[in-house]
Image (spheres, rainbow, N blue to C red):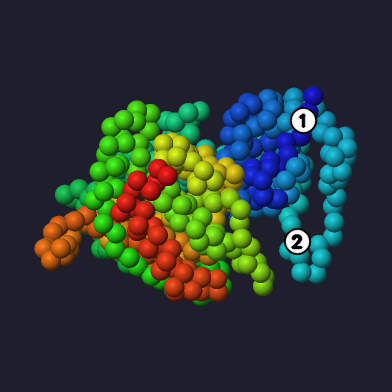
Amino acid sequence: MANIELMPKLGMTMTSGKITKWLKKEGEQVEQGEPLLEIETDKVTMEEEATYNGILLKIIAKEGETIPVNQPIAIIGQEGENVEDLLKQSNIIEEQKEPQQNEPIKETKKPISQGEQTTIPTKPRATPAARKIAKEHDINLTQIKGNGPSGRIQREDVEEYLENLQQRKLPTQEEPKSQPVSYTKTIPLTGMREIIANKMKQSINTAPHYYVTMDINMEEILKLKDTLNQKLQNTKITINTILIKASSIAIKEYPIINSSVQDDQIILKEQINIGLAVALEDGLIVPVIREADKKGLSEIAYEERQLIEKAREGKLTPDDYEGGSFTISNLGMYDITQFTAIINQPEVAILAVGKITKTPVVEEEEIKIKPIMKITLSSDHRVIDGALAAKFLKRIKEILEDPLQLML
Protein backbone atom coordinates (compact mmCIF):
# COMPACT_ATOMS: atom_id res chain seq x y z
CA MET A 1 0.00 0.00 0.00
CA ALA A 2 1.30 3.43 -0.92
CA ASN A 3 2.05 5.93 1.86
CA ILE A 4 2.50 9.69 1.80
CA GLU A 5 5.66 11.26 3.20
CA LEU A 6 4.88 14.59 4.89
CA MET A 7 7.07 17.62 5.53
CA PRO A 8 8.19 16.85 9.10
CA LYS A 9 7.86 19.30 11.98
CA LEU A 10 11.47 19.35 13.17
CA GLY A 11 10.97 21.83 15.97
CA MET A 12 8.32 23.51 18.09
CA THR A 13 8.46 26.74 16.10
CA MET A 14 8.98 25.26 12.64
CA THR A 15 6.14 26.09 10.24
CA SER A 16 7.73 25.16 6.91
CA GLY A 17 10.89 23.72 5.38
CA LYS A 18 12.76 24.22 2.13
CA ILE A 19 13.72 21.09 0.21
CA THR A 20 17.34 21.58 -0.87
CA LYS A 21 18.09 18.11 -2.25
CA TRP A 22 16.42 14.75 -2.81
CA LEU A 23 18.86 11.95 -1.99
CA LYS A 24 16.69 9.43 -3.86
CA LYS A 25 15.04 9.71 -7.25
CA GLU A 26 11.69 8.41 -8.41
CA GLY A 27 11.72 4.66 -8.98
CA GLU A 28 14.49 3.93 -6.47
CA GLN A 29 14.16 1.58 -3.51
CA VAL A 30 13.84 3.31 -0.15
CA GLU A 31 14.41 1.75 3.27
CA GLN A 32 12.78 3.07 6.42
CA GLY A 33 15.34 5.13 8.36
CA GLU A 34 17.50 5.73 5.27
CA PRO A 35 18.35 9.38 4.40
CA LEU A 36 15.74 10.50 1.87
CA LEU A 37 16.19 14.26 1.42
CA GLU A 38 17.81 17.40 2.82
CA ILE A 39 15.60 20.07 4.42
CA GLU A 40 16.62 23.64 5.22
CA THR A 41 14.99 25.33 8.20
CA ASP A 42 15.57 28.93 9.21
CA LYS A 43 18.93 28.07 10.82
CA VAL A 44 20.35 24.80 9.51
CA THR A 45 20.14 22.17 6.77
CA MET A 46 19.65 18.59 7.87
CA GLU A 47 18.98 15.18 6.40
CA GLU A 48 15.54 13.64 6.92
CA GLU A 49 15.01 9.89 6.91
CA ALA A 50 12.33 7.92 5.10
CA THR A 51 9.32 6.89 7.17
CA TYR A 52 8.38 3.90 5.03
CA ASN A 53 9.87 1.00 3.05
CA GLY A 54 9.22 0.70 -0.67
CA ILE A 55 9.73 2.45 -3.98
CA LEU A 56 9.82 6.25 -4.25
CA LEU A 57 6.84 6.40 -6.59
CA LYS A 58 6.33 10.14 -6.73
CA ILE A 59 8.23 13.26 -5.68
CA ILE A 60 5.51 15.84 -5.04
CA ALA A 61 7.63 18.72 -3.74
CA LYS A 62 10.58 19.67 -5.93
CA GLU A 63 14.01 20.88 -4.89
CA GLY A 64 13.95 24.56 -3.98
CA GLU A 65 10.31 24.55 -2.89
CA THR A 66 9.25 25.63 0.60
CA ILE A 67 6.52 23.39 2.00
CA PRO A 68 4.41 23.87 5.17
CA VAL A 69 4.81 21.20 7.84
CA ASN A 70 2.56 18.13 7.59
CA GLN A 71 2.00 18.71 3.87
CA PRO A 72 2.72 15.90 1.35
CA ILE A 73 6.16 15.87 -0.26
CA ALA A 74 6.43 12.33 -1.71
CA ILE A 75 4.72 8.97 -2.09
CA ILE A 76 6.39 5.66 -1.21
CA GLY A 77 4.78 2.33 -2.09
CA GLN A 78 5.16 -0.81 -4.17
CA GLU A 79 6.19 -0.92 -7.80
CA GLY A 80 3.28 -0.51 -10.18
CA GLU A 81 0.88 1.05 -7.68
CA ASN A 82 -1.39 3.79 -9.01
CA VAL A 83 -0.67 7.01 -7.13
CA GLU A 84 -3.29 9.16 -8.87
CA ASP A 85 -6.12 8.17 -6.50
CA LEU A 86 -3.89 8.86 -3.52
CA LEU A 87 -2.99 12.27 -4.93
CA LYS A 88 -6.66 13.15 -5.40
CA GLN A 89 -7.56 11.93 -1.90
CA SER A 90 -4.87 14.23 -0.53
CA ASN A 91 -6.17 17.18 -2.59
CA ILE A 92 -2.98 17.14 -4.64
CA ILE A 93 -4.18 17.57 -8.21
CA GLU A 94 -1.52 18.28 -10.76
CA GLU A 95 -2.97 20.45 -13.48
CA GLN A 96 -1.50 21.77 -16.67
CA LYS A 97 -1.88 25.54 -16.40
CA GLU A 98 -1.15 28.33 -18.80
CA PRO A 99 1.90 30.34 -17.78
CA GLN A 100 1.01 33.77 -16.44
CA GLN A 101 2.44 36.95 -17.87
CA ASN A 102 5.50 37.05 -15.62
CA GLU A 103 5.83 33.32 -15.14
CA PRO A 104 8.56 31.49 -17.09
CA ILE A 105 7.35 28.88 -19.53
CA LYS A 106 8.30 25.42 -18.34
CA GLU A 107 9.40 22.86 -20.85
CA THR A 108 7.08 19.88 -21.05
CA LYS A 109 8.69 16.51 -21.42
CA LYS A 110 7.11 14.10 -23.84
CA PRO A 111 6.30 10.66 -22.49
CA ILE A 112 8.94 8.03 -23.14
CA SER A 113 7.72 5.15 -25.24
CA GLN A 114 8.38 1.57 -24.25
CA GLY A 115 11.21 1.26 -26.72
CA GLU A 116 12.96 4.50 -25.78
CA GLN A 117 15.55 4.81 -23.09
CA THR A 118 16.50 7.83 -21.04
CA THR A 119 19.28 8.54 -18.63
CA ILE A 120 18.43 10.47 -15.47
CA PRO A 121 21.53 11.94 -13.88
CA THR A 122 22.25 10.40 -10.50
CA LYS A 123 22.76 12.78 -7.58
CA PRO A 124 25.32 11.02 -5.42
CA ARG A 125 25.00 10.98 -1.66
CA ALA A 126 27.74 12.91 0.09
CA THR A 127 28.49 14.51 3.43
CA PRO A 128 28.27 18.33 3.69
CA ALA A 129 32.07 18.52 4.05
CA ALA A 130 32.55 16.47 0.87
CA ARG A 131 30.12 18.67 -1.06
CA LYS A 132 31.89 21.82 0.13
CA ILE A 133 35.33 20.65 -1.03
CA ALA A 134 33.94 19.42 -4.34
CA LYS A 135 32.25 22.79 -4.95
CA GLU A 136 35.45 24.69 -4.10
CA HIS A 137 37.41 22.67 -6.66
CA ASP A 138 34.61 22.44 -9.26
CA ILE A 139 34.48 18.64 -9.08
CA ASN A 140 31.53 16.55 -10.24
CA LEU A 141 30.73 14.17 -7.38
CA THR A 142 29.49 11.53 -9.81
CA GLN A 143 33.16 10.93 -10.70
CA ILE A 144 34.03 9.91 -7.14
CA LYS A 145 33.43 6.56 -5.51
CA GLY A 146 32.11 6.86 -1.97
CA ASN A 147 33.49 4.62 0.76
CA GLY A 148 31.03 5.67 3.47
CA PRO A 149 27.84 3.88 4.55
CA SER A 150 25.72 2.86 1.55
CA GLY A 151 28.40 4.31 -0.74
CA ARG A 152 28.11 7.84 0.65
CA ILE A 153 30.97 10.12 -0.44
CA GLN A 154 33.01 11.40 2.49
CA ARG A 155 35.57 14.18 2.85
CA GLU A 156 38.43 11.66 2.60
CA ASP A 157 37.10 10.35 -0.73
CA VAL A 158 37.14 13.84 -2.28
CA GLU A 159 40.61 14.61 -0.90
CA GLU A 160 41.97 11.33 -2.29
CA TYR A 161 40.43 12.09 -5.69
CA LEU A 162 41.99 15.56 -5.67
CA GLU A 163 45.40 14.14 -4.78
CA ASN A 164 45.23 11.60 -7.61
CA LEU A 165 44.06 14.31 -10.00
CA GLN A 166 46.99 16.56 -9.12
CA GLN A 167 49.47 13.70 -9.60
CA ARG A 168 48.10 13.02 -13.06
CA LYS A 169 48.49 16.70 -13.96
CA LEU A 170 52.15 16.97 -12.86
CA PRO A 171 54.28 17.89 -15.91
CA THR A 172 56.85 15.36 -17.13
CA GLN A 173 60.35 16.24 -18.28
CA GLU A 174 59.20 16.20 -21.91
CA GLU A 175 56.14 18.34 -21.23
CA PRO A 176 56.64 22.09 -20.76
CA LYS A 177 54.97 23.56 -17.73
CA SER A 178 51.94 25.59 -18.55
CA GLN A 179 51.86 29.25 -17.65
CA PRO A 180 49.95 30.07 -14.45
CA VAL A 181 46.43 31.33 -15.04
CA SER A 182 44.94 34.07 -12.93
CA TYR A 183 41.21 33.78 -12.30
CA THR A 184 38.51 34.76 -9.84
CA LYS A 185 36.23 32.15 -8.33
CA THR A 186 32.67 32.91 -7.29
CA ILE A 187 31.14 30.99 -4.37
CA PRO A 188 27.34 31.27 -4.07
CA LEU A 189 26.09 32.56 -0.72
CA THR A 190 23.71 29.69 -0.02
CA GLY A 191 22.61 27.35 2.75
CA MET A 192 23.88 28.07 6.24
CA ARG A 193 26.14 30.92 5.09
CA GLU A 194 23.15 32.70 3.51
CA ILE A 195 21.11 32.25 6.70
CA ILE A 196 23.95 33.60 8.85
CA ALA A 197 24.54 36.54 6.50
CA ASN A 198 20.88 37.57 6.60
CA LYS A 199 20.60 37.24 10.40
CA MET A 200 23.80 39.19 11.07
CA LYS A 201 22.77 41.95 8.66
CA GLN A 202 19.38 42.15 10.34
CA SER A 203 20.97 42.29 13.80
CA ILE A 204 23.54 44.99 13.09
CA ASN A 205 20.96 47.11 11.22
CA THR A 206 18.25 46.69 13.87
CA ALA A 207 20.01 46.76 17.24
CA PRO A 208 22.34 49.67 18.13
CA HIS A 209 25.34 47.71 19.43
CA TYR A 210 27.77 48.89 22.07
CA TYR A 211 30.45 47.03 23.99
CA VAL A 212 31.93 46.84 27.51
CA THR A 213 34.98 44.73 28.44
CA MET A 214 36.24 43.44 31.78
CA ASP A 215 39.31 41.49 32.98
CA ILE A 216 38.71 38.48 35.23
CA ASN A 217 41.23 36.65 37.41
CA MET A 218 40.59 32.98 36.64
CA GLU A 219 43.00 31.56 39.25
CA GLU A 220 40.37 30.22 41.65
CA ILE A 221 37.99 29.00 38.97
CA LEU A 222 40.75 26.98 37.28
CA LYS A 223 41.53 25.30 40.61
CA LEU A 224 37.85 24.45 41.11
CA LYS A 225 37.52 23.12 37.56
CA ASP A 226 40.51 20.80 37.99
CA THR A 227 39.22 19.57 41.37
CA LEU A 228 35.74 18.82 40.04
CA ASN A 229 37.03 17.06 36.93
CA GLN A 230 39.15 14.73 39.08
CA LYS A 231 35.95 13.58 40.78
CA LEU A 232 33.74 13.33 37.68
CA GLN A 233 33.94 10.23 35.48
CA ASN A 234 31.33 10.48 32.72
CA THR A 235 31.68 14.13 31.78
CA LYS A 236 34.10 17.04 31.87
CA ILE A 237 33.50 20.56 33.12
CA THR A 238 34.85 23.23 30.76
CA ILE A 239 35.26 26.99 31.01
CA ASN A 240 32.10 27.22 28.89
CA THR A 241 30.24 25.10 31.44
CA ILE A 242 31.20 27.52 34.18
CA LEU A 243 30.39 30.58 32.05
CA ILE A 244 26.93 29.21 31.28
CA LYS A 245 26.20 28.70 34.98
CA ALA A 246 27.72 32.05 36.05
CA SER A 247 25.77 33.91 33.35
CA SER A 248 22.50 32.28 34.39
CA ILE A 249 23.06 33.36 38.02
CA ALA A 250 23.81 36.94 36.94
CA ILE A 251 20.78 37.01 34.65
CA LYS A 252 18.49 36.11 37.56
CA GLU A 253 19.67 39.29 39.26
CA TYR A 254 19.42 41.38 36.07
CA PRO A 255 16.43 39.84 34.22
CA ILE A 256 16.28 42.57 31.54
CA ILE A 257 19.35 40.85 29.99
CA ASN A 258 17.02 37.88 29.39
CA SER A 259 14.66 39.68 27.01
CA SER A 260 13.90 40.44 23.38
CA VAL A 261 12.41 43.34 21.42
CA GLN A 262 9.25 42.78 19.39
CA ASP A 263 7.85 45.82 17.59
CA ASP A 264 7.69 48.48 20.32
CA GLN A 265 7.69 46.09 23.28
CA ILE A 266 10.35 44.48 25.45
CA ILE A 267 9.50 40.84 26.13
CA LEU A 268 10.92 39.44 29.37
CA LYS A 269 11.48 35.69 29.08
CA GLU A 270 10.66 33.36 31.94
CA GLN A 271 13.23 30.68 31.12
CA ILE A 272 16.97 31.37 31.18
CA ASN A 273 18.12 29.47 28.10
CA ILE A 274 21.82 29.94 27.38
CA GLY A 275 23.09 29.39 23.83
CA LEU A 276 26.68 28.36 23.13
CA ALA A 277 28.07 29.27 19.69
CA VAL A 278 29.63 26.23 17.97
CA ALA A 279 31.79 26.62 14.86
CA LEU A 280 31.08 24.23 11.97
CA GLU A 281 32.84 23.84 8.63
CA ASP A 282 30.23 25.88 6.78
CA GLY A 283 29.12 28.31 9.46
CA LEU A 284 27.96 28.71 13.03
CA ILE A 285 25.15 27.16 15.08
CA VAL A 286 24.01 27.99 18.62
CA PRO A 287 22.64 24.99 20.55
CA VAL A 288 20.83 25.90 23.77
CA ILE A 289 21.11 24.78 27.40
CA ARG A 290 17.57 25.27 28.70
CA GLU A 291 16.86 26.58 32.20
CA ALA A 292 20.57 26.71 32.96
CA ASP A 293 19.93 28.46 36.26
CA LYS A 294 18.17 25.35 37.58
CA LYS A 295 20.96 22.92 36.65
CA GLY A 296 24.23 21.98 38.31
CA LEU A 297 27.63 22.11 36.65
CA SER A 298 27.76 18.38 35.90
CA GLU A 299 24.33 18.42 34.24
CA ILE A 300 25.23 21.47 32.16
CA ALA A 301 28.55 19.85 31.17
CA TYR A 302 26.80 16.66 30.04
CA GLU A 303 24.23 18.57 27.91
CA GLU A 304 26.98 20.81 26.53
CA ARG A 305 29.01 17.82 25.32
CA GLN A 306 25.96 16.12 23.79
CA LEU A 307 24.88 19.25 21.91
CA ILE A 308 28.37 19.99 20.56
CA GLU A 309 28.70 16.40 19.28
CA LYS A 310 25.29 16.59 17.60
CA ALA A 311 26.17 19.96 16.05
CA ARG A 312 29.42 18.69 14.54
CA GLU A 313 27.71 15.55 13.23
CA GLY A 314 24.89 17.59 11.69
CA LYS A 315 22.28 15.92 13.92
CA LEU A 316 20.85 18.95 15.74
CA THR A 317 17.09 19.40 15.55
CA PRO A 318 15.41 22.82 15.76
CA ASP A 319 14.44 22.05 19.37
CA ASP A 320 18.18 21.91 20.16
CA TYR A 321 18.91 25.43 18.95
CA GLU A 322 15.66 27.41 19.19
CA GLY A 323 14.41 29.43 22.15
CA GLY A 324 17.73 30.84 23.39
CA SER A 325 17.63 34.01 25.50
CA PHE A 326 21.36 34.79 25.91
CA THR A 327 24.41 33.62 23.93
CA ILE A 328 28.05 32.94 24.81
CA SER A 329 30.71 32.94 22.07
CA ASN A 330 34.16 31.69 23.13
CA LEU A 331 37.15 32.03 20.79
CA GLY A 332 39.78 31.43 23.46
CA MET A 333 40.65 28.02 22.00
CA TYR A 334 41.79 29.86 18.84
CA ASP A 335 44.23 32.08 20.83
CA ILE A 336 41.93 35.11 20.52
CA THR A 337 42.37 37.30 23.60
CA GLN A 338 39.52 39.75 22.96
CA PHE A 339 36.79 40.37 20.37
CA THR A 340 33.29 41.75 19.95
CA ALA A 341 30.34 39.65 18.81
CA ILE A 342 27.14 40.50 16.92
CA ILE A 343 23.97 39.97 18.96
CA ASN A 344 22.05 36.80 18.13
CA GLN A 345 18.61 38.22 17.36
CA PRO A 346 16.03 38.40 18.86
CA GLU A 347 18.20 38.40 22.00
CA VAL A 348 19.52 41.68 23.43
CA ALA A 349 23.04 40.69 24.51
CA ILE A 350 25.89 38.29 23.74
CA LEU A 351 29.04 37.53 25.74
CA ALA A 352 32.35 37.27 23.83
CA VAL A 353 35.05 35.31 25.68
CA GLY A 354 38.79 35.41 25.02
CA LYS A 355 41.76 33.21 25.86
CA ILE A 356 43.05 32.92 29.44
CA THR A 357 46.53 34.43 29.39
CA LYS A 358 49.26 34.75 32.01
CA THR A 359 49.32 38.47 32.74
CA PRO A 360 51.32 40.61 35.18
CA VAL A 361 49.00 42.30 37.67
CA VAL A 362 49.59 44.49 40.71
CA GLU A 363 48.42 42.83 43.91
CA GLU A 364 49.19 44.38 47.31
CA GLU A 365 51.74 46.60 45.59
CA GLU A 366 53.54 43.57 44.14
CA ILE A 367 53.62 42.44 40.54
CA LYS A 368 52.30 38.90 40.19
CA ILE A 369 51.50 36.69 37.21
CA LYS A 370 47.82 35.73 37.09
CA PRO A 371 45.60 33.87 34.57
CA ILE A 372 43.46 36.69 33.17
CA MET A 373 40.49 36.31 30.83
CA LYS A 374 38.83 39.20 28.99
CA ILE A 375 35.08 39.11 28.44
CA THR A 376 33.14 41.60 26.29
CA LEU A 377 29.40 42.12 26.44
CA SER A 378 27.67 43.30 23.25
CA SER A 379 24.37 44.96 24.20
CA ASP A 380 21.31 46.27 22.40
CA HIS A 381 21.25 49.91 23.50
CA ARG A 382 17.46 50.05 23.04
CA VAL A 383 17.16 47.83 26.12
CA ILE A 384 20.46 47.87 28.04
CA ASP A 385 22.35 51.00 29.00
CA GLY A 386 26.03 51.24 29.91
CA ALA A 387 25.59 51.14 33.69
CA LEU A 388 23.46 48.00 33.54
CA ALA A 389 25.92 46.26 31.22
CA ALA A 390 28.77 47.12 33.59
CA LYS A 391 26.85 45.81 36.62
CA PHE A 392 26.04 42.57 34.81
CA LEU A 393 29.67 41.98 33.82
CA LYS A 394 30.84 42.85 37.33
CA ARG A 395 28.46 40.23 38.76
CA ILE A 396 29.91 37.58 36.44
CA LYS A 397 33.41 38.66 37.52
CA GLU A 398 32.45 38.31 41.22
CA ILE A 399 31.14 34.79 40.65
CA LEU A 400 34.17 33.63 38.69
CA GLU A 401 36.66 35.11 41.16
CA ASP A 402 34.72 33.61 44.08
CA PRO A 403 33.57 30.32 42.50
CA LEU A 404 31.89 28.95 45.61
CA GLN A 405 29.00 31.17 44.56
CA LEU A 406 28.39 28.68 41.75
CA MET A 407 27.38 26.10 44.35
CA LEU A 408 24.89 28.29 46.24
Q: Is residue 395 left or right of residue 73?
A: left
Q: Nearer the viewer, residue 93 or 247?
A: 247
Q: Nearer the viewer, residue 68 or 105?
A: 68
Determine whether 249 is above or below 75 in the image. below
Q: Which tag, 1 or 2, sits closer to the chain's start?
A: 1
Q: Nearer the viewer, residue 309 or 329?
A: 329
Residue 188 seen anywhere in this rendered image of the structure? no
- For the point 73% across and 31% down, which residue is it? 76
Q: Quadrant of the N terminus?
A: top right
Q: Which residue is mark 1?
A: 3
Residue 361 seen anywhere in this rendered image of the structure? yes
**Local secondary structure at mark 2:** loop
Marking on residue 105: 2
Q: Is residue 331 left or right of residue 369?
A: right
Judge the density around disc 2: few (<14), some (14-19), many (≥20) Cα neighbours within 10 Å. few
Determine whether 49 is above or below 331 in the image. above
Residue type pointed to by label 1: Asn
User: In x, y percent, where is residue 296?
Assistant: 45, 39
Residue type pointed to by label 2: Ile
User: In x, y percent, where is residue 306?
Assistant: 46, 37
Q: Quadrant of the C terminus?
A: top left
